């Protein structure tokens, strides 16, 4: 088991409200929540919303809605970075006074030209620290110009290394990385900086996020140290990136895997959380509630290889969840008028809750059965042999027995034409459960309609 640490665990989920959450975000949120719950710690929701041009209130609301849908209640927050600008400004002043934050004036066009030149010479296209080489006079004239500076962080020499709770020993060679811009020309902080300040001031003990942040984590460890904390003050865990079922980058189809899209398709939150918590581990993909998932959650059991997100596996798990879901849990998502008897009859044949609409149309609406060549006489006889109502679960067996006695048919030869005439489908829920729901009048009408369409 991964030891969450000696001090009270505090983790955070820190999305930017610039779009809807997708399965990659959900996996990170879930891992943080399960880790905190397993350790009896706190799960903090923080919104990294300093990009005022892209962050929108509707995305903020959607993030909270999606987390509630998953069942991931947060203990603190949401903490909004836009409310903490004074804290970032104060931290920036400390770095300036320490000589670690320096002003730059190059335009994006100038930086791009430098990158091309470095690539042409066969060297890494990182920032050349030209701003650090400016004389006092040059810097004074630049400050006096109309163009305000943006501020870069001067990275340390050497490398920074840590024991990652998922990936094992990891190291970042800081001289191979461009000095990051931490403060924009308008004075607003960038994510790399604001995130560190927040993590330190909120007492975050563990950061659990995607493997694509490894280099960024190395940079942020250096910023942590520059702000006077121990670079190992926060433990790191990087989850391997998600790929598709065939190993393709998941980013190509991430839009179709937003939580909103999955919810609209009929995926159950319990299926998604069970899948995201256990895929990429040796554990079986089986239905489990959040408490069970938290009790068994261990970062050390997560594979270091890319995790394959297979929609077929998720659908299979969703099917298992639905088959055990009580009526009250889905009542508000079923067609108007749907009863518990209906749900119990059809849930075993559903992959998605949205498929219940079709079966409600079968039992309560109007369907057109397909032509059944050569079955006209049998269907008319079946209509004539129908027992009177009221009907119950025993009606189908009694009806079949009388038809077998009259026609000699049994098994598939008997039930296939009846099922097709009454439901329009080759397969589906048990007819013993469906017949009372369809009702005698509809059954007679459909049998006669199907019989009239063929000799």
Image: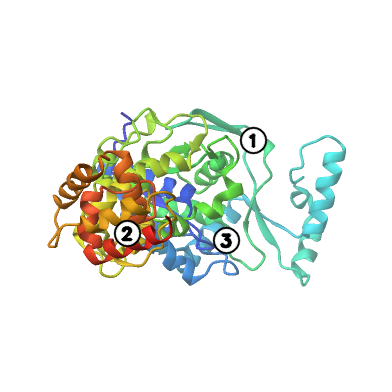
Q: Which residue is mark 1?
A: 157
Q: Which residue is mark 3?
A: 189
Q: Secondary structure at mark 3?
A: loop
Packing grade of label 2 (10 A; few <14, some 14-19, many >=20) is many
Name the side, left or right, on which 345 lies relative to 312.
Answer: left
Q: Is residue 269 visible?
A: no
Residue 179 point in image, percent of width and height: 67, 46
Residue 71 point in image, percent of width and height: 30, 54
Q: Which of 356/290 is in front?
A: 356
Q: Which of 387/86 is in front?
A: 387
User: Of tags 2 and 1, which is closer to the observer?
Assistant: 2
Quarter of the view holding residue 312:
top left
The answer to the question of whether label 2 and label 3 lie on touching residues, with beta carbons closer than 8 A, is no
User: Of tags 1 and 3, which is closer to the observer?
Assistant: 3
Name the side, left or right, on which 210 lies relative to 13.
Answer: right
The answer to the question of whether label 1 and label 3 lie on touching residues, with beta carbons closer than 8 A, is no
């Amino acid at each position: 088991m991964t030891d969450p640490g000696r001090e009270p665990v505090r983790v955070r989920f820190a999305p930017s409200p610039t779009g809807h959450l997708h399965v990659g975000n959900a996996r990170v949120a879930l891992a943080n929540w399960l880790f905190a719950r397993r350790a009896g710690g706190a799960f903090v929701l923080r919104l990294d919303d300093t990009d005022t041009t892209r962050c929108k209130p509707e995305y903020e609301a959607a993030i909270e809605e999606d987390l509630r849908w998953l069942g991931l209640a947060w203990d603190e927050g949401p903490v909004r970075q836009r409310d903490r600008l004074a804290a970032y400004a104060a931290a920036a002043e400390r770095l300036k006074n320490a000589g670690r934050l320096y002003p730059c004036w190059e335009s994006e066009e100038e930086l791009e030209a430098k990158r091309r030149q470095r690539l042409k010479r066969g060297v890494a296209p990182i920032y050349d620290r030209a701003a650090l080489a400016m004389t006092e006079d040059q810097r004074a004239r630049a400050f006096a110009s109309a163009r305000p500076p943006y501020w870069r962080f001067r990275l340390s020499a050497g490398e920074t290394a840590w024991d990652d709770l998922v990936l094992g020993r990891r190291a970042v060679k800081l001289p191979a990385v461009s000095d990051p811009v931490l403060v924009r020309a308008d004075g607003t902080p960038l994510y790399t900086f604001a995130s560190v300040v927040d993590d330190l001031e909120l007492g975050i003990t563990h950061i659990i996020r995607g493997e694509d942040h490894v280099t960024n984590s190395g940079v942020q460890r250096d910023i942590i140290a520059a702000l006077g904390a121990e670079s190992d003050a926060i433990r790191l865990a990087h989850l391997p990136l998600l790929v598709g079922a065939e190993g393709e980058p998941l980013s190509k189809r991430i839009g179709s895997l937003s939580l909103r899209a999955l919810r609209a398709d009929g995926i159950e939150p319990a299926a998604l959380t069970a899948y995201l918590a256990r895929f990429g581990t040796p554990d079986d993909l089986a239905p489990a509630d959040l408490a069970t998932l938290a009790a068994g959650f261990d970062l050390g059991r997560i594979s270091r290889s890319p995790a394959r997100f297979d929609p077929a596996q998720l659908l299979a798990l969703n099917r298992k969840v639905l088959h055990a879901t009580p009526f009250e849990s889905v009542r508000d998502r079923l067609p108007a008028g749907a009863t518990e008897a209906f749900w119990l009859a059809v849930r075993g044949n559903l992959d998605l809750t949205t498929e219940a609409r079709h079966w409600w149309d079968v039992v309560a609406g109007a369907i057109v059965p397909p032509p059944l060549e050569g079955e006209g006489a049998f269907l008319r006889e079946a209509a004539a042999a129908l027992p009177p109502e009221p009907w119950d679960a025993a009606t189908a067996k009694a009806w079949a027995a009388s038809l077998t006695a009259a026609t000699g048919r049994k098994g598939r030869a008997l039930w296939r034409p009846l099922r097709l005439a009454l439901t329009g489908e080759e397969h589906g829920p048990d007819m013993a459960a469906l017949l009372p729901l369809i009702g005698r009048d509809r059954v007679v009408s459909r049998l006669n309609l199907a019989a009239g369409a063929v000799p």
